């Protein structure tokens, strides 16, 4: 945006970057875009094929309704819009096949530019010729509708290609060109070809798009239409190291991105249906005039001013060798995930059941404990998923012959980060305020737990590592923000009981039991570890069919563990996981 005029100008440079630009949504990377052609969301993929043949730009002329009759058949098909020899980077090199095509295009540019009725007549690849006409004995030899032509071109493979262009009036002359089917992106970096101009991939989208933003009932605009967002943190609001609001209410309050009253003192949570939010959103006239008041959204949060990215994992120092990386996963991160999962499960057992809460005399307690037990179970399950992914990272490294061996990692850490750049002992304790504070501290974004994967991510971005590995590591890293948010919601829910007498009425009196007292639960727990170990070992050998029954049996045992653990908790006995 030009700060002087307030006008927005198209720029493709960031979209072409070979890396994830801070502040850009993932859909600026072509491989991640949610796109189709009726029209697309972030782009219309038909616009790629306008330049399917280097040096030429076509338009696909189609009926508004492809079931309608052919009223103007000679207009339909792939119409040659113009010749683009000088500005197309794919025809500038001195390679023999490129130089030949460039000369052919320049020699024919005069004839092609002198008339505006040149159309694609046929394409030929690997000895097979596709005609752009409808050959049917019962009908005239009409040109195909532009949409059908596009579908044929869309199916072409990258590689050598010969095309025939024909005038549809005058002398009906034909020009044959030998070239290749354009690669739309660089095969190594994924960067979009420089042949495409700023805004070209978006042309033909909904117009006016502002109305579509307001009234599209799809509700799945991946990045351009965020629906509900977190409001911008004000300059006077206390902030966390990651830039989020320190106040849990503000940090967890989602608002309607299309709200018409954007004053901070008028902020209210977004409702759960389209109809409930409609009266408070921009109307049609207003969005046409004031659409630039809609804030940019970065990481689910509105940004009103210039976005300054926080220090990120890109600056972390990679491990020197794959073995050092494996040691970090095997001895630190995997055990850390498992210890957290067990701490969260133990804390869940310490809470009253909803049925017990009904007897407490607190009208809100049943809903509160049901919510908190659910949160703890979800987050504990996520930590177990992270443990699975840590194991998968290790067997990926092993199968890529980057480390010498793989063995399942299924033991809890003895110490955990305290969220204050120090360490604490792993502790099985009820969900007291102090316990909840520990959970919040360790899950706090840009604190310790998410930062623990910084060096892992930096290492896996190196070219020697399989692509799948970095994707797994980044998924683990990104989950921490949601965990922190959920624990903050738990903190808000428990404020109701802060001054209760007796204290902590939502808790059972549970203490860590002896191995003998909890022998049934420990047997189930060790069965789970054995089954997971067998399953992960088979998975690491690429024996998925053999490993799946072990993993499925382990999941069934996890449900059994919850049942046995709940029964013990009713007797005041906690499972001594360590």
Image (cartoon, rainbow, N blue to C red):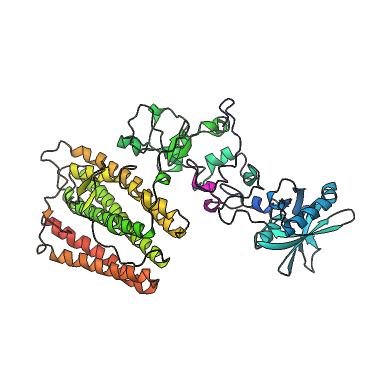
Q: What residue is at 35 percent from the left and 50 percent from the top?
A: 453
Q: Quick check: 344 above or below 134?
A: above
Q: Judge from the rendering whether residue 217 lies leftward or rightward of residue 251; answer left or right.
A: right
Q: Quick check: 23 above or below 236?
A: below
Q: What residue is at 45 percent from the left and 29 percent from the top?
A: 261
Image quarter in which the C terminus is found: bottom left
Q: Judge from the rendering whether residue 489 lies leftward or rightward of residue 123; answer left or right.
A: left
Magenta portion: prevailing SS class: loop
Q: Judge from the rendering whether residue 381 lies leftward or rightward of residue 16; answer left or right.
A: left
Q: Residue 300 in the image: x percent, y percent?
A: 43, 41
Q: Residue 159 in the image: x percent, y percent?
A: 67, 62
Which residue is at the far top? Answer: 4
Q: Quadrant of residue 567?
A: bottom left
Q: How many marks?
A: 0
**Residue 21 painted magenta:** yes
**Residue 33 painted magenta:** yes
Q: Nearer the viewer, residue 527 or 62?
A: 527
| The magenta segment | 11-37
Q: Quick check: 230 above or below 410?
A: above
């Amino acid at each position: 945006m030009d700060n002087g005029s307030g006008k927005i100008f198209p720029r493709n440079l960031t979209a072409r970057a070979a890396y994830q630009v801070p502040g850009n949504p993932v859909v600026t990377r072509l491989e991640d875009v949610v796109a189709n052609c009726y029209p697309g969301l972030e782009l219309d993929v038909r616009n790629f094929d306008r330049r399917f043949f280097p040096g030429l730009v076509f338009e696909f002329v189609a009926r508004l309704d492809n079931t309608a009759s052919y009223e103007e058949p000679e207009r339909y098909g792939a119409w040659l819009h113009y010749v683009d020899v000088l500005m197309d980077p794919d025809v500038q090199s001195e390679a023999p096949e490129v130089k030949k095509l460039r000369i052919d295009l320049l020699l024919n540019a005069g004839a092609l530019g002198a008339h505006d009725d040149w159309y694609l007549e046929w394409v030929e690849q690997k000895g097979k010729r596709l005609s752009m006409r409808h050959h049917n004995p019962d009908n005239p030899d009409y040109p195909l509708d532009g949409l059908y032509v596009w579908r044929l071109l869309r199916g072409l493979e990258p590689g050598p290609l010969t095309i025939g262009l024909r005038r549809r009036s005058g002398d009906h002359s034909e020009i044959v060109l030998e070239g290749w089917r354009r690669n739309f992106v660089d095969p190594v970096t994924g960067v979009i070809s420089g042949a495409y101009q700023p805004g070209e991939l978006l042309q033909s989208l909904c117009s006016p798009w502002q109305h579509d933003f307001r009234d599209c009932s799809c509700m799945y605009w991946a990045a351009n239409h965020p629906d509900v967002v977190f409001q911008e943190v004000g300059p006077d609001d206390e902030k966390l190291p990651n830039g989020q609001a320190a106040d849990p209410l503000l940090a967890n309050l989602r608002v309607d991105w299309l709200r018409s009253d954007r004053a901070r003192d008028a902020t209210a949570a977004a409702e759960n249906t389209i109809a409930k939010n409609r009266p408070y959103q921009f109307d049609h006239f207003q969005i046409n005039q004031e659409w630039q008041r809609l804030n940019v959204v970065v990481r689910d949060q509105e940004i009103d001013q210039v976005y300054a990215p926080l220090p990120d994992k890109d600056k972390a120092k990679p491990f020197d060798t794959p073995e050092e990386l494996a040691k970090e996963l095997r001895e630190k991160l995997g055990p850390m995930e498992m210890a957290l999962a067990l701490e969260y499960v133990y804390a869940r057992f310490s809470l009253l059941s909803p049925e017990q809460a009904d007897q407490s005399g607190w009208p809100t307690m049943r809903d509160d404990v049901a919510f908190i037990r659910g949160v703890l179970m979800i987050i504990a399950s996520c930590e177990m998923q992270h443990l699975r992914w840590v194991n998968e990272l290790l067997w990926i490294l092993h199968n890529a012959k980057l480390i010498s061996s793989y063995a399942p990692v299924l033991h809890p850490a003895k110490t955990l980060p305290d969220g204050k750049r120090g360490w604490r002992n792993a502790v099985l304790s009820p969900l007291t305020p102090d316990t909840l504070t520990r959970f919040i501290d360790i899950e706090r974004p840009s604190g310790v737990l998410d930062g623990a994967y910084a060096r892992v991510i930096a290492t896996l971005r190196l070219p020697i590592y399989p692509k799948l590995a970095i994707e797994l590591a980044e998924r683990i890293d990104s989950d921490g923000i949601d965990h922190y948010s959920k624990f903050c919601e738990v903190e808000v829910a428990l404020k109701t009981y802060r001054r209760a007498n007796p204290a902590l009425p939502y808790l059972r009196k549970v203490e860590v039991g002896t191995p003998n007292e909890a022998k049934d639960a420990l047997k189930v727990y060790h069965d789970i570890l054995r089954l997971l170990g067998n399953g992960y070992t088979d998975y690491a050998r690429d024996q998925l069919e053999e490993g799946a029954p072990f993993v499925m049996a382990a999941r069934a045992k996890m449900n059994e563990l919850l049942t046995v653990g709940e029964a013990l908790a009713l007797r005041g006995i906690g499972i001594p996981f360590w």
